[in-house]
Amino acid sequence: MLIGYVRVSTSDQNLDLQMDALKTAGCDKIHKDIASGAKDDRAGLLDVLTYIRKGDTLVVWKLDRLGRSLRHLIDTINQINAQGCYFRSLQENIDTCTSGGKLIFHIFGALAEFERDIIRDRTKAGLAAARKRGNTGGRPKIMDNKKIALAKTLIANKSHSINEICSILKISRATLYRYLKRE
């Protein structure tokens, strides 16, 4: 059975083009979403992924209607394949029922993995270069040695409450206790 999935990002956009294409392709049932592709919780996509059964083919008008990123697209299609189902994109002419469609899909997967590796390598190189310049990264420390010494003095003096000390130092109670615990 051919099961369709259509999506537009906003309610002022029209599903007609996608719907007509999927009906022409022979889809028996079509699931719809009006949601940004960046959203994780698309009800129509979740419905179609639970609706399809072994041997069914999920059909979309275009790849970008299914996945918000190449990684998400590949994960979704792998989930479909793991269910014993197939995937077909009309505009890109990809059909995982065929050996050629499987090849194209695996090429996309390899490109996505390559892209992730490049990003990871760039990130590592950037962090190493920053460390050489003396940048350790992370959130800046809110309390230096002077503030810690002042906090200890105020606490030892016992003339101020913890809330007053936190107000003077412009920090939270949790921050005060965290820095005192370290010392």
Image: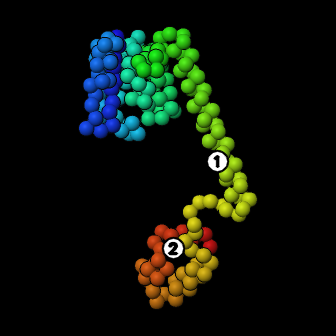
Query: What amino acid does circle 2 point to?
Result: Leu
Q: Which mark is residue 123?
A: 1
In the image, 101 versus 44, the foreground residue is 101
Q: Position of residue 55 (x, y in %)?
A: 41, 11
Q: How is the image coloured?
A: rainbow
Q: Position of residue 101 (x, y in %)?
A: 51, 15
Query: What amino acid does circle 1 point to?
Result: Thr
| Quarter holding residue 64 | top left
- The local secondary structure at tag 2 comes to helix
In the image, 17 versus 83, the foreground residue is 17
| Quarter holding residue 100 | top right
User: Would you name the residue on which mark 2 appears?
Assistant: 176
Drawn side of residue 135 relative to residue 152, left or right: right
Q: CA distance from mark 1 to mark 2?
A: 33 Å
Drawn side of residue 52 relative to residue 118, left or right: left
Asked if residue 63 is positioned above or below residue 26 in the image, the reply reads below
Q: Position of residue 89 (x, y in %)?
A: 43, 20
At horizontal 45% and vertical 72% (from top left) the residue drawn is 172
Residue projecting furthest to the right: 132
Task: Locate the N terminus by quadrant.
Answer: top left
Report if residue 82 is visible in the image: yes
